[in-house]
Amino acid sequence: MINFHVYGKTSIILFLFFVFSFLELSAQETDHTPSYPNFKIDGTLKTKFEHATETGMSRFSVRNSRVGVAGDINPYSAYRVQVELSNEGKFNVLDLSGTLKPIEGLSLTLGQTSIPLFNSYIVAPGSMMFANRAFLGKYFLSTRDLGFVAKYDFLLGTIPTKFEFGVFNGNTINDPVWKEDVSYGGRIELGSMQGFRMTAKVYDYPNDEETHFLFYGADLRYEQKNWKVETEIMKRESKTEFHPDLLSYYLQGAYTIPIRTKMFEFVKPAVRWDAIDGSPDVGGFDVNRLTTGVGFGFKSERFTSILRLDYEWYMVNHQMDIFSPNDEMDSDKFTLELLFTF
C-alpha cells in the first residue's frame, strides 16, 4: 500500500526545493549584495551496491537523500532545516533549529540539532572518507537531539579555538519527551581543518532506568592540500547493568591525486583501521576491521560527486550483539557507492 502521508511530504519538499533553487539562481544573476533574509540550498544523494563475500548476499540501496536549507534572517539570527527523504526507505526530519548570534564568535542554537560529540567527517554522508561509517560513528549514539547548544569561537593565542556546550532531551530525534534528567555535554576544539586539529569531548546521556551512558573521547587530525590523516578514540561507559561498555577507535587517511579525464578530476585512495570492544575483561578488541577504498571524483564550486569502491575485511574475535541483526553486518564486503553533494 502506498503511504500517501510520506509521499505527500516528499512532494511538498521537492516542490519547495525547486522553487527555492530557481529563486536563488535568479537572485545571484541580478544582485550580488548581501540581503536579509537569505538562504542556501544543500543536499546529499548517496546510492550504493553491496556484496557480502562470506554469505554471497547482495543488495542495492539509497542510503541517504538529504535536502536542507540554511540562511540568515538578519546579521544576528539564522536558521537551519534539513530532512532525510529516504534513509534506507525511512523519512526523517534531521535539523530544525534557530540560532542567535549576540556577539562576534558566539552562537546560541535552540531546536533539533547535532550533539557536541561526533565529527562531521565521520557521520555526515557528504563528508565521509568511506561508504560506511566508522564503528564509533554508527553504534554509539544518534548524532542529533532536541535541545540547546552554545558555541564560542575565539583565538587562544594564535590557535583557533572553539568551545561547545549543549543540553538535550536525551531521547534522540523527533521525540519531544518530558524528562526529569536531561543529557548534557561539551567539546573543546583546537586548530583548524588545515594543519593540526584536535578535540576532546564528554557527554552524559541518561535515557531511562535501564539506559544511562557516559561518553568521552578525543581525536587528532592533520590535513594538507592533497592528503589527510585522522584518528579518534571514544568510550561509552554504561551506568547500569543492562548494557555493556563500548570502546572504539579508528585511524584513517586519504591522498588526492589530480587527474584530467572527461568525467573525473581526481582519484582518492584511502585506508582505515578501526576496532570496537564490548568485553573489557577479555584481552583484545572484539571486532577489528580493515577498509581500503578508491574514489573517482569531480568537484566544482557548488557541486561534488564521487564514485567510490571499498572493500572491508572483518576480524571477529568475539561475537557482539550489535552485529546480530543479520550475518552481512560483520561479513567481508565490497561496496560500490555513488555520492552527489551540492
Image (cartoon, rainbow, N blue to C red):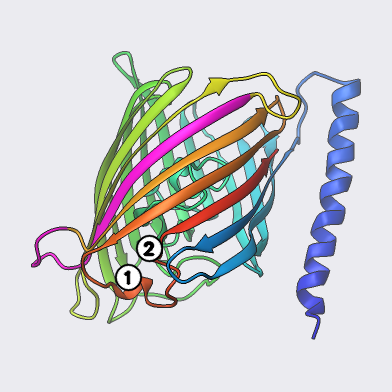
Looking at the picture, does residue 100 appear above or below residue 60?
above
Q: Which residues are magenta?
A: 266-284
The residue type indicated by label 2 comes to Tyr
Measured as percent of width and height from the top left, residue 8 is found at 83, 70
Count of numbered circles on the image? 2
Left or right of 314, for residue 238? left
| The C terminus: image quadrant | top right
> CB under 8 Å between callouts 2 and 1?
no
**Tag in front: 2 or 1:** 2
Looking at the picture, does residue 232 appear above or below residue 329?
above
Q: Is residue 278 a member of the stretch shown in magenta? A: yes
Residue 15 falls in image quadrant: bottom right
Measured as percent of width and height from the top left, residue 21 is found at 84, 40
Secondary structure mostly seen in magenta is strand
Measured as percent of width and height from the top left, residue 213 is found at 26, 66
Looking at the picture, does residue 38 appear above or below residue 246?
above
Residue wearing tag 2? 139
Residue wearing tag 1? 181
Question: Element under label 2?
Answer: loop
Precedes in sequence: disc 2 or disc 1: 2
Q: Residue at x 86, y 31 (%)?
A: 25
